[in-house]
Each structure stands twice: as C-alpha cells, then as structure tokens.
Amino acid sequence: MNPKRRAPSPIFDNLEQLGNPYKIRSFSADALFSDTASIIRNSAIDYEYAWKFMYSYNGSSATFNAYRREIERLLQWSWHIRKQSVCFHKREDIEDYVKFCNKPPVAWIGTKNVARFKTKNDVREANGDWRPFVVSGSKNDNNKGKDLDKKDFALSQSAIQAIFTILSSFYNFLIQEEITESNPVLTIRQKSKFVQKQQHKAPVRRISNLQWEYIIEIIEKLADDNPAKHERTLFIIYCLYAMYLRISELVADERAIPVMGDFRKDLDNNWWFHVVGKGNKSRIVTVSNDMLKALKRYRKHLGLTALPAPDDKGPLIPKNLGRGPVTSTRQIRSIVQECFDAAYQQMRSDGLEDDAAELKSATVHWLRHTGISEDVKFRPREHVRDDAGHASMQTTDRYIESELRERHASGRKKRVKDF
C-alpha cells in the first residue's frame, strides 16, 4: 500500500516507558517496518541515535515531548516516504520534508491528541488511533462542537521554526557522535520561504481590564460561598496573574515539586517566590503585597500559619481529594476555565456581549500575559523581565503597547481631503 495512504505507527513511547538507551547493547528498527522488503539501510542507527538524542532532554517532559514529536516525524517521513536514512539527507531532502509537514497526507492527520501507546493485558502496544499530525480548531470552534476538517491542517510559523531548530540540534548531535559529517539544516539559506518574517510585533493575547474585574470578583465570591472548593482556585488565579507563573510551574513534575517553602523572606523582609521554570531554569519572583495577602488567606483556609517557614514542604497546590500535590496541568486548566465560563455568563447577563465573546477565546496562559502587560506599564522593564523569566528584553518588549498606541494616535487624523 502507498505509505501516504496508511498512517505510520508511533516509534517512541513516553519517557517513563522508554528507559535509558545508553544501557542497551543493540538496537533494531525492523519491527517498525511492515515487511522485511521495506527495511531501509541504517534504520537501526537512526533509531538508536534518535533515542539517545531525545533522552538527553529527559529533565523536562514538555521539552522531551516536543523533541520526540519532531524527530519521530522525521524518521517516519525518511523511512516510509523518502526511503532513506536520516544519515544521508542533504539540503534538498530537508526542504522537501518541511513542505511535506506543511501539507501531510490526510491519512497522517488526526483530529484529536491521543496517546501513542496503550497498555493491553500488561503489554504496551501502538495506538491505532494515533497520527503524527493533528488538526486543531479555535477554542470557540471546539466549544461549539464544530467538526474539524483534516484538509484545513497547516503548520503555524512557530511550528515551522521548531522544525528547523530541533532538527538542526539533532544533526549537530549526529556530527558529534560521528554518524554524519554535515548538518543539512544549516545549508538551507533561504528559510524565509518557509518562515515568514514579520515587520510588526505579534499582538500579545491577553484579557481586558474589564474581563479581569469580572473574573476576580466572581472567583472571590465563589471562594466566600464555597471555600472548600474555591479558596484553592482563588490562590491559583493570583499565582498566574500576580506572579506571571506558567501553569507548568504550579504542578509537580520530574523537574520540581512546588512547595509552600518556596515563598521565602530575605534579610530586608522582602518576600520572593523561588521557582524552577521553562528550560529547567530557576528564578525568583517578586511577591507583591496583594500576593502576600492572598497567600495568607489561602494558608488560613488550610489551617496553617499565616506565612510559611523556609523548610515548609507542604505542596503549593494540594489535591482536593487525597494527599500530595497536583501533578496535572490539565487540572489547572479546568479549574481556571470554570472561572472564565462563570465570568462569561455574568458578562452576558450584564449585556456585555462583545466583551463576553472575546473572553470565550481566552486560555489560562492569557493570565500570565495580562499580568506582564499591566506591570510593564509602570515597573522597570528589566524587573518585569526577571520576574517573568524572559531570556531577553526583546521578549518583554512585546508586552509594551504604548508604541502602537502612539503610532496609531499620530496617524489617526491623517487627512485624505482638505475639505
């Protein structure tokens, strides 16, 4: 059968299932081909070094998953479509691969994210519903239950950029391991035909001040009416907005387990929150007076002292049922989404249809964007940069809206006619 008409099987399982490739003596990828005649030369080498490359990112499941996605797609295209080992790819092969990713065969596209493998009778087996590519719709479309059309699939600019970044790192790794002699990604001079360059800054997705007022008022009322359920929700909202935390920085994972003792006071009696964030980088975040009040309120609800001691190992976001910390970002999203939905309904009831409709598209990450956007108006940029964990000032500058406001104000009264 034409490989474009048949979805390939997944290659690599989850990190906890894969294990350490450096402890394995021999590798074979034969089982990943439909028959012996389709096995290509050097597929075992591809398999071994792709695994070893991905394993080097085992410090973060999110990073590992991103690298696994790109490397796995490359192997599947190389083996089943190009019928060539990744060791032999040249510039033109990578260019063809990027074109393929931007418009993959329908058989390779799914309409929802599913696990690559599942357990059946204590044996891990490939999930037949899994696909290398997944078409996604807007949040509004998903809420309306709109069916997704696989023909609408297209890579975003950030996804195309990720292909170049990750594959270039992979080929540099192969060079270091003396598997190949050159990096074909670096020889692509005109990446601009794949990645568009924008003259203007992409707008930051954030909620409006009015929407934020509705959200915080509603969640405070919910916390007053049902503290057992919503005091934790209120604290989560404060962490996301007031300290610009990412949802991954609130949950326990292999990188870190956030605890109450991560709130610490320095010698000047200033409070800071110590967090391990994106890229496994640690930073400290300014704890404002309002954030400190929110912490005290939450700890009082939990029956704890007003403020934590440095050795307080209690989970920052504990489970409502059972013991231990929350480990799922999906659960955090669900909690915040409930707040958004309640605010949406209240705004509609108050006749604010347009503002409510915009809130319907909001995601949890918008709270971080909103907190940064508000603070950069009056705080020094470098302070906001360090609290947010931005790698450069350029990232922080995306949140400065004054330049666009001034630009529009200067052009608003431009005349076309003198009468």
Image (cartoon, helix red, strand yellow):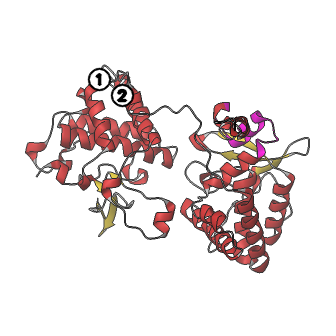
> In front: 398, or 117?
398
Q: Residue at x 50, y 48 (%)?
A: 62
Q: Is residue 48 visible?
A: no
In the picture of the structure, the residue carrying the numbered disc 2 is 171
> In front: 365, or 321?
365
Q: What residue type is labelled 1?
A: Thr
Quadrant for residue 227, please give it. bottom right
The disc at residue 180 is 1
Decide: few, some or many residues near mark 1? Use Cα within 10 Å; few <14, some 14-19, many ≥20.
Answer: some
**Which secondary structure lies at badge 2?**
helix
- Taking 144 as reference, is 327 left or right? right
- Rendered-image quadrant of the C terminus: top right
- Magenta range is 375-393
- Which residue is situated farthest in the bottom direction here? 225
Q: Do the residues labelled 2 and 1 touch (CB within 8 Å)?
A: yes
Q: How many numbered markers are drawn?
A: 2
Q: Does the magenta stretch include residue 136?
A: no
Please provide percent x and percent y for residue 200.
58, 34
Q: Residue at x 72, y 54 (%)?
A: 241
Q: What residue type is labelled 2?
A: Tyr
